[in-house]
Amino acid sequence: MELGIYFIFFFTTAVVIFVPGPAAIAIAAQGAGNGHKRATYGVLGVASANAVYFILSAMGIASLLIASPFIFNAIKWVGVAYLVYLGLTAIFSRTGGIQFPTGRLQSATSLFGKGFLVEFANPKALLYFAAILPQFLDVSRSIITQILIMGVTTVVLDLISYSLYAYAGDRLTSGAVKEWIVRMINRVAGGALLLAGARMATV
């Protein structure tokens, strides 16, 4: 892979990953309630989901999934339902969204699972990887090497981006921000998740 092509891939993927979405909101909420260090488990969950989609895309399976209306719609509607659930709990529930720490930490398995599910249930990630990989592959060079380079780059960008969101959520509830502001942020975040679910339903 030529260096110029790699930089285009790097910046394209970085923009997609760093733009706030459902996973970013979920990880920020984990950082707020569990601390940014413990929210690393959720970050690893998100990165793992993207890694799975990346591997599927590299193997050509993603194209088959997209071509199968039943499988693609199953993934899509699970994602829609989960985003609606997250949005409603962020708005109406005291246990959803960004919370001030209560001393009761979620388990590592729970944090990882929630991070994995919120990202894996998003078919846009599947569409992105299936569409972007072929654009940057040079068939005259080692395909496996190029896929490994892009895969590692994607995971590293995931870890950096969502770690920052976890840290931001942690700082938000560290005492520097009043509780009513956090409640307002939860309502805005909940609305954003509901909007994301509505938009996902039209994919």
Image: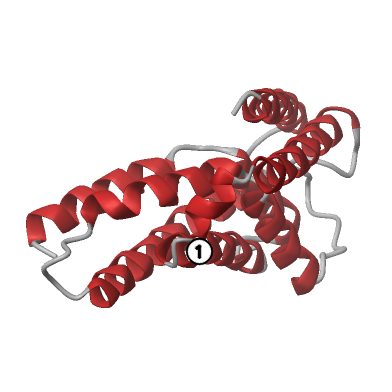
Asked whether residue 174 is in view, the answer is no
Coloring scheme used: secondary structure
Q: Residue at x 59, y 59 (%)?
A: 46
Residue 147 spot, x, y in % from top left: 31, 69
Q: Where the N terminus falls, by quadrant?
A: bottom left
Crowding at dot 1, Cα within 10 Å, few <14 / some 14-19 / many 20+, comes out as some
> Relative to 83, is 35 above or below?
below
Give the left or right position of residue 60, taking residue 97 as reference.
Answer: left
| Residue closest to the eye, 88 or 187 | 88
In-front residue for pair 185/66: 66
Residue 112 sits in quarter: bottom right
Q: Quadrant of the C terminus?
A: top right
Q: Position of residue 149 (x, y in %)?
A: 28, 70
Residue 103 x, y percent position in the rendering: 85, 62
Looking at the rendered structure, the kind of residue marked 1 is Leu
State the count of labels: 1
Q: Residue at x 78, y 47 (%)?
A: 100
- Picture coordinates of residue 179 (x, y %)? 76, 33
Q: Nearer the viewer, residue 179 or 119?
A: 119
Residue 55 lies left or right of residue 42; in this view the side is left
Q: Is residue 81 above or below residue 52?
A: above
Q: Is residue 82 visible?
A: yes
The residue singled out by tag 1 in the image is 56
SS for callout 1: helix
Q: Is residue 59 left or right of residue 93?
A: left
